Image (cartoon, rainbow, N blue to C red):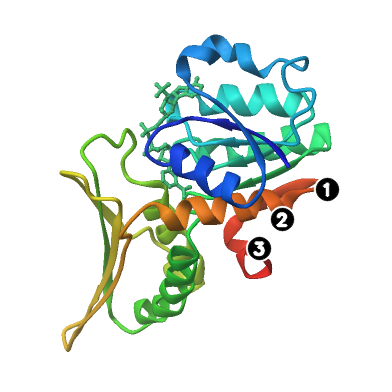
C-alpha cells in the first residue's frame, strides 16, 4: 500500500520500519512539514491509500478532520481524542471512509482487556478495584488511553446496578514504555493483573496489520473488536 505516516517519534518511527518490512511504500511527515495540516490537502493525499497517525493529542483531531474530508482511510494510534469518538464516527460515516483506532494496538493489551472484562465479575462479590498505569515522563495525556479503555470494559462488564468507574492512578517516570495494572481486593484476598510492554514493537506491528485489514473497507472500527481477524 501507499501509506502516509504522520509522526516520526518513538512509536511512529517503528511503525514506518514495520510497514516497509511488510512491503509497503511509506512517506513520513513530521510536525515541521505539516503546519496547519498543510500536508493533508486533497491534492497532497491523492495517491495515498491510508494515513497512519502517531502524532500527539494536541493535533490529532485536526488531522482526522482533514484526512476524512479528503476521503482517506485512517489508522489512528495517537490518543487524547476518544472523548470525541461519537462526533468522529459520524464524520467518518458521512464521508464513507474507513477508520480504525486503538489506544493500544498490541495484541497483548487487547487480550489483557478480555482478561480484565472477565475479572470484573469480582465486583459482584464484594471486591473493590483500582487501576494503575505507568508511562515515560514525556507522555502528554493522563490517564493513558489504555487505562481508560480498561476502565470502560470493566464498567461495562460489571453488574448493571453497580456500574462504576474504577479509580485510575497515573505515574510518569523515566522511560517506561507502558505498564497497566488492575488490582481487585476483598477482605479475603487480592488479585493482581498486569500488562508490561517491553518495547513499542507490539504497537507498531498491530497498527500496520490494522492498516492492511482496513484496505477496501468503510466504517468506524475499534481495534479491540477486530484484532482476532488479523
Ligand atoms: N495506539 C497505540 O498502540 C499507541 C502506542 C504508543 C503511543 N501511542 C500514542 O501515540 C502518540 C505518539 O506517541 P509517541 O510516544 O510516539 O510520541 P512522540 O515520540 O512524542 O512522537 C510524536 C511525533 O508527533 C509528531 N508531530 C507532532 N505534531 C505533528 C503534526 N502536526 N504533523 C505530523 N507530525 C506531528 C512529532 O514530530 P516532530 O518530531 O517532527 O516534532 C513527533 O515525532 C501519543 O498520543 C501516544 O499516546 C499510541
Contact? badges 2 and 3 (CB < 8 Å): yes
> What residue do we see at 81% from left, 33% from top?
94
Q: Residue at x 47, y 59 (%)?
A: 106
Q: Residue furthest bottom?
A: 188
Which structural element holds mark 2? Answer: helix
- Place residue 181 in its image quadrant: bottom left
- Say which of 164 and 146 sits in front: 146
The residue that appears at 27% across and 78% down in the rendered structure is 127
Query: Is 211 drawn above or below residue 2 in the view shown?
Result: below
**CA–CA distance between discs 3 and 1?**
15 Å
Q: CA distance from mark 2 to mark 1?
A: 8 Å
Image disc number at residue 216: 1
Image depth: mark 2 or mark 3 in front: 2
Residue 24 percent coordinates (x, y): 67, 44
Q: Which residue is mark 2?
A: 213
Task: Give the vertical position of 180 relative to 98 (above or below).
Answer: below
Q: Is mark 2 within 8 Å of ligand 1?
A: no
Along the line of sight, which residue is nearer the eye, 182 or 45? Answer: 45
Q: Label 1, secondary structure: give it.
A: loop
Residue found 69% across the figure and 40% down from its top? 89
> Considering the image in quadrants, where does the C terminus appear?
bottom right
Residue 201 in view: yes
Identify whether 213 is placed above or below 114: above
Disc 3 marks which residue?
226
Q: Is residue 183 left or right of residue 94?
A: left
Give residue 25's position: percent from left, percent from top: 67, 37
Amino acid at each position: 500500500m501507499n501509506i502516509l505516516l504522520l509522526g516520526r517519534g518513538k512509536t511512529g518511527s517503528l511503525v514506518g520500519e514495520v510497514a516497509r518490512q511488510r512491503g509497503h511504500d511509506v512517506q513520513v511527515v513530521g510536525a515541521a512539514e505539516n503546519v496547519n495540516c498543510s500536508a493533508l490537502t486533497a491534492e497532497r493525499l491523492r495517491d495515498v491509500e491510508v494515513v497512519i497517525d502517531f502524532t500527539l493529542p494536541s493535533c490529532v483531531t485536526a488531522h482526522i478532520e482533514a484526512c476524512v474530508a479528503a476521503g482517506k482511510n485512517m489508522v489512528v494510534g495517537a490518543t487524547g481524542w476518544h472523548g470525541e469518538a461519537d462526533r468522529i464516527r459520524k464524520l467518518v460515516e458521512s464521508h464513507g471512509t474507513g477508520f480504525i483506532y486503538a489506544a493500544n494496538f498490541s495484541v497483548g493489551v487487547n487480550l489483557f482487556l478480555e482478561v480484565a472484562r472477565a475479572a470484573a465479575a469480582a465486583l459482584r462479590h464484594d471486591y473493590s478495584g483500582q487501576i494503575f498505569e505507568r508511562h515515560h515522563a514525556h507522555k502528554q495525556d493522563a490517564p493513558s488511553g489504555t487505562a481508560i479503555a480498561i476502565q470502560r470494559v470493566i464498567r461495562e462488564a460489571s453488574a448493571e446496578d453497580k456500574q462504576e468507574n474504577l479509580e485510575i492512578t497515573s505515574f510518569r517516570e523515566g522511560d517506561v514504555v507502558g505498564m497497566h495494572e488492575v488490582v481487585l481486593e476483598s477482605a479475603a484476598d487480592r488479585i493482581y493483573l498486569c500488562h508490561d510492554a517491553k518495547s513499542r514493537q507490539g504497537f507498531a506491528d498491530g497498527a500496520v496489520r490494522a492498516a492492511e485489514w482496513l484496505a477496501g473497507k468503510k466504517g468506524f472500527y475499534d481495534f479491540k473488536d477486530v484484532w482476532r481477524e488479523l
